[in-house]
Image (tube, grey):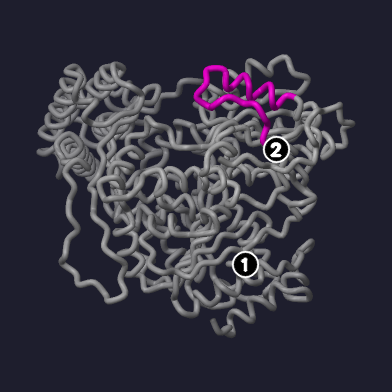
Amino acid sequence: MTSSRLADASRAALADGGQLAGGIDGFRARPAQQDLSAAIAEAFDTRGTLLAEAGTGTGKTFAYLVPALLSGKKTIISTGTRALQDQLYHRDLPRVRDALGVGFRSALLKGRANYLCHYRMRQAQGGADLVPGLKDAGARFSTREQAAQFERIVAWSGRTRMGDLAELADLPEDSPLHALVTSTAENCLGTECPFFQECFVVAARQRAQAADVVVVNHHLLLADLALKQEGFGEILPGAEAFVIDEAHQLPELAAQFFGESLSARPLVELARDTLLECRQVPAALASLQAPANELEHCVRLLRTSMDLLPVRGTRRRAQEELAVEAAFDALDDALAALQDALRPLAAASPGFDSCLARADEFRGRLDRWRNEADHDAPVEAEDDEPEADDAPPRRRNDGSVLWYELSARGFRLSRTPLDVAGPLAQHRARTQAAWVFTSATLAVGGRFEHFSIKLGLWQPQTMLAPSPFDWQSQALCYVPRGLPEPSARDYTAAVIDAVRPVLQASGGRAFLLFASHRALRESAELLRDGPWPLFVQGEAPRSVLLERFRASGNGVLLGAASFREGVDVAGDALSVVVIDKLPFAAPDDPVFEARLDAIRRNGGVPFRDEQLPQAVITLKQGVGRLIRTETDRGVLVLCDPRLVNRQYGRVFFNSLPPFPKTRDLAPVREFFGVADLPDADDPQQPLLGFA
């Protein structure tokens, strides 16, 4: 590949003596970062597609920001979470911009659920007392703190310029107040809203349309690619380049957004919003109160009846229970009755018209979930469009899986497509833009086929940018001897017995990551008597646990899947990461099981084609918590004996950084500077024993 002017300029900016070295304190030139940036620049210039795995510490954020800003192209950067989105926009982007000395317009765009809705807030403020009979329909605050927080939101609403609820640092992400003061695509009144001219969502869209660089998150990007219209679709045609950071998350998220769901909360909100709209037309209350209350009752009835079911399962499993089927019938009847009551009132106010549209949509979703064919009756690929000569072999469309999931007080009915490669490929082709996908975990054994197939990519450019860390001196991988098979009843107790001497050598300072919450709870009980402060997922919010863990200095934190990624603890506070089992997907996931069935029907091998590569990528995410900077040191403890007694263990090890490996405790104690005890095993014996 010949080097372009943009590639050369990007390399120079990231080199010793370049603009970033001169403009950003602590910046260090890294060859891998320069190579990555040049490859991204080439993709920008050719409007090509690049898959790039960038090892931890490579500096991939600067690597893609430099060509994005130097190119002058309208670029959309998508990140995995809103927290990363805020960090990128408020911290990283300004630093690179100032170092490069370039002028450009930037915008931060989030989904509408992040922005205050004046109309919804006003409804919550006064609805309960303005119309007789509405005392149960207004804002409900379960605590005084919630009521006080709502008043703080109202006060803030008068002075905020962006309307982004992230500005309210003391408003928890899971606060029920979010739903009261934000809109959804279903309940937004659009141009009919009396506050349309003041709408924060509209203002954010306008800023994004005028910007050169727009920072979004995957949820927003995918919602609009899937034509869910979260407010971003109108600027997609103007983008010349897309950078997808934390791209490993994209396939699973895409399956959600190209599918469809119906959950308890929007149904309850529809019932309550219907009554709140009676503020505008008080005479309507007489005809709407009974069907709205009946709808809310039927939602509760359905959730209660589903207690007979497992927490997660297929539609077929739900329909086997007569009580659940009867509750579905009652919910459908309640939606129909509300539709009939709203129809003659739709012209009376924009709010009633919106409620009728929502009732129509929700009833349609319920009908499709109950009656559509699922993956047992696959839909063949359409042949309406001719294929290009160099197009990949067309994959069979295996339809969707219909399934449900229960939470403590709610439910979700979902239709999830088994293959999103086709829709994603179509949307990418429509943009005619450059696409860069990057993450620390995209490759399996140094190869990208698994990820490429999932995204419908055909012969993309690929790159492995190695981490700059000195793995031989900074880290050690320990696989304990003598552990039973993970299916053994006493496996978790054996894991804790094997890990305890490591914690003694390290003085705590550890993450213990578990494949199940059951193992997490059992381990917590086994470690309660230990000398280290113990922090257990579920006993406090994640952010609070991490803050306490860092402050403790010698804590031991026990977490499950959500702690495998997006957690950054640099320095001495974290020196050990323990992983109890290889993270193969849970057998009770109906989408995963249906996906394996589809692979099998199409002549593939489910374990080789899906289960193994997905587990490798997930393991890499957990391992990535250990070493975050060039000065970090730590021990990775992989407890699962299948790593050494199954042939596929090699695939896992070949996908991890080049750790030195041991099966003995002596090198672990030596790593932490602890005097070793007499040991019958050779402390220098390498990791052997692959079957």
The location of residue 316, given as percent across then percent down, is 21, 29
Q: Is residue 54 above or below residue 664?
A: below
Instruction: Please say whether residue 208 is visible from this viewpoint.
Output: yes
Comparing 648 with 39, the one in front is: 648
* Screen quadrant of the N terminus: bottom right
Judge left or right: residue 279 versus residue 572: left
- Give the quadrant of residue 184: top left
User: What number is the disc on residue 478?
Assistant: 2
Judge left or right: residue 564 versus residue 121: right
Mark closer to the observer (2, 1): 2
The location of residue 54, given as percent across then percent down, is 60, 60
Judge left or right: residue 609 versus residue 545: left
**Badge 1: few (under 14), some or many (20 or more) residues near its Cα, within 10 Å?**
many
- Residue designated by label 1: 63
Magenta stretch bounds: 478-500
Name the residue type under label 1: Ala
Q: Is residue 355 above or below residue 309?
A: below
- Whether residue 190 appears in magenta in the rendering, the answer is no
Kindly identify the residue that appears in the image at 87 percent across and 37 percent down.
Answer: 673
The location of residue 282, given as percent across then percent down, is 21, 31
Name the residue type under label 2: Tyr
Q: Is residue 276 above or below residue 159?
A: above
The residue at the far right in this view is: 675
Instruction: Please say whether residue 269 is visible from this viewpoint.
Output: no
- Whether residue 494 appears in magenta in the rendering, the answer is yes
- What is the secondary structure assignment of the residue under circle 2? strand
